[in-house]
Image: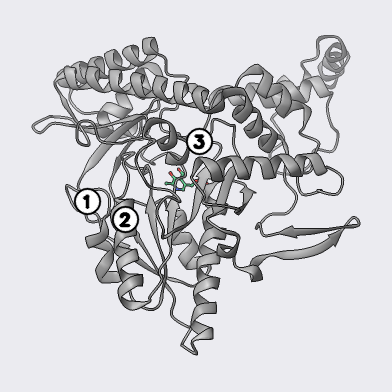
Amino acid sequence: MSIELSEKLEALAATYGNRFLLEPAPDDALPEHGMRSLDAMRLVGEELILDGIPQRNLATFVTTWMEPEAQRIIAENLHRNFIDHAEYPQTAEIEQRCIRIIASLFNAPGETTGARTQGSSEAIMLGALSLKWKWRQRREAAGKDTTRPNLIFGGDVHVVWEKFCRYFDVEPRIIPLQPDKYTIGPDDVEPHIDENTIGVAAVLGTTFTGHSDDIPGINDLLVRLRENTGNDVPLHVDAASGGFVWPFLYPHSEWDFRLQQVRSINVSGHKFGMVYPGIGWLIFREKSDLAEDLVFYENYLGKTDATFTLNFSTGSAMVLAQYYNFIRFGFNGYRYLMETMQANAQGLAKRIADIGEFRLVGLDGAEQLPLVAFQLTDGHQYDEFDVASQLAAERGWMVPAYTLPPNAQHVTIMRALVKLTLSHTLAAKLADDIADACAILKVKGGLHEHDRKRVKTGTGY
Ligand SMILES: Cc1ncc(COP(=O)(O)O)c(C=O)c1O
């Protein structure tokens, strides 16, 4: 560009505000000069049109829409550092209210404790650390070896459980799935338990199919074990997705602190708690289930504070948004919203089954998250990855196709989450689009490798 033209443009930029359109976005070093705030805002915003539209992301469990009033609370509280309890005592009090509300929703028998976390991953790390610490205390008190802790869980868990084992030096005892069984129960767990087992983790609402492990069965096994041998193995429930679904859709189903061996539960506020990311919760059955050694007491800004999170500074906005949802919806509101999602999921499932190309994953009437997991029936010229890619190409739907963990790695599943943003009309449109995708694939066959790359093959978050 000539100097003359450049100067002319510079002068015009002050008027038209579009100088940044002519330059590459800074991408490897802090730019020497900044730009006007309006330009910076446009530069960031305009690039994001290349991202997917969150409401069309049917892979994610995470909230993609909140009410304007909730958004206002979030926007007005972004400057409040959550950890600064001395300066923001009311925010800390609201966190404690949320913990008590969730503990009572999960039928805690009495006084309890817990923490706000960044999501279920942090909550799981902390909960599992407490299992390890409590186990070590028991072993030390009995004068026994503490060098070989193990943790039992199924192949149906989220990757965070393996991460915990690797980061914190615990042997993972992973129960493989079977080609036709995608959750675990007591018979799967029993052979793996020994005196070095720090705990068993069971999932309420798996990432893969939305079903639940047999938590009452595993609890009975652990109760029997304790009574017969004195080996008291705690059960942690990973209710990342299910914790805000089961209490409303399946209130009589026992999976929580009604079961004796359930000592801790994690739940993601940013999944069916219906808050934007990131907010999670860890709830202990009783105060004594939190290993005291994990709690740090410090004098911060003149007040003694007890913390046991992995992070320190973090936002308050999502804690306040969680409390907003609790008081805004109440029990009946949450139930109504869950029933709405469930009704739309059931409607979508029926429409997908009616296409005649798919079977639904799971037994009719099984307790499940509001989602549809489905797979192609045998004898097609194309597979689930082709269908997912065709859907992405035609309407931008993000419906993942993925294979299951061992020993069900030959099973491919597609899965659509049905959240509040997938209305009856949109769910019907999605089913029509799936039928159209199949019709097109039938004519032209499976997609080219390049198109298949568009497929979302992760299970979603
Ligand atoms: C069963 C389960 N556990 C844990 C997690 C991790 O949760 P987060 O993303 O809140 O850290 C997920 C996320 O999808 C999940 O489905």
* Marked residue nearer the N-terminal end (1 or 2): 2
* Image location of residue 219, percent across then percent down: 34, 58
Q: Residue furthest bottom?
A: 143
Q: Is residue 199 above or below residue 196?
A: above
Q: Residues within 10 Å of mark 3 (few under 14, many from 20)?
A: many
- Residues tagged 1 and 2 counted as in contact (Cβ below 8 A): yes
Position above or below: 157 against 232: above
Label 1 close to label 3 by CB (< 8 Å)? no
Q: Residue furthest left?
A: 379
The mark that comes first in sequence, 1 or 3, is 3
Q: Report the front residue among 320 and 454.
A: 320
Q: Secondary structure at mark 3?
A: loop
Query: Gap in Å between the C-alphas at discs 1 and 2?
Result: 9 Å
**For this view, does 348 lie left or right of residue 304?**
left
* Label number found at residue 408: 1
- Mark nearest the camera among 2 and 3 is 3
Q: Residue at x 49, y 51 (%)?
A: 265
Disc 1 residue type? Answer: Ala
**Distance in Å between CA atoms under marks 2 and 3:** 21 Å
Label 2: which residue?
A: 155
Q: Which amino acid type corresponds to the residue marked 2 in the rendered image?
A: Gly
Q: Give the percent coordinates (x, y) of residue 269.
A: 56, 38
Q: Secondary structure at mark 1?
A: loop
Name which residue type carries label 3: Lys
Residue at 44 percent across and 46 percent down: it is 239
